[in-house]
Amino acid sequence: MKGKKEYCAGCRDDFYNHRENMNGKRGCWSFETAESVTRYKLHWWTAPTVPGAFREVTTNSCHHEPGQYAFYKELPDCAVEAMRPKVNA
């Protein structure tokens, strides 16, 4: 499924969706090929073994928030107990 602009919020490259780029275009270059995907979100300073540390989210495949959150394609084996409810990134 094609990516959605609403999932760009919080991404490091969302900056480019609100300004003209050096090439004269407006928008993030990664969004052109983005797909809506399910990821497992973990806060940067949360140990992955803490119960409920991961949250299942729907976001764009290119979404990244270095220094804030890590996004896993699959729930790691070290995840314990139930995750928090699914939300949009």
Image (tube, grey):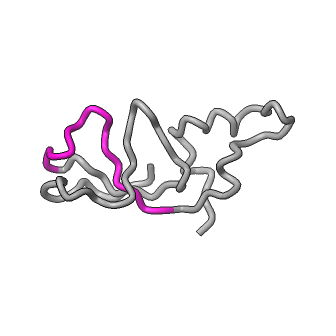
The residue at 57%/46% (across/down) is 8
Verify whether residue 39 appears in magenta: yes
Q: Position of residue 69 (x, y in %)?
A: 38, 39
| Quarter location, residue 76 | bottom left
Side (left or right) of 26 relative to 37: right
Give the farthest residue toward the bottom: 1
Q: Position of residue 63 (x, y in %)?
A: 52, 47
Q: How many marks?
A: 0
Side (left or right) of 61 relative to 29: left
Q: Position of residue 6 (x, y in %)?
A: 58, 50
Please determine whether, in this image, residue 45 is positioned above or below residue 80: above
Verify whether residue 46 appears in magenta: yes
The residue at 15%/46% (across/down) is 49
Q: Position of residue 51 (x, y in %)?
A: 13, 49
Give the farthest residue toward the front: 77
The residue at 34%/57% (across/down) is 56
The residue at 84%/35% (across/down) is 23
Side (left or right) of 9 relative to 17: left
Give the extent of the magenta segment.
Answer: 37-51
| Quarter location, residue 3 | bottom right
Quarter of the N terminus within the rendering: bottom right
Please determine whether, in this image, residue 59 is positioned above or below residue 15: below
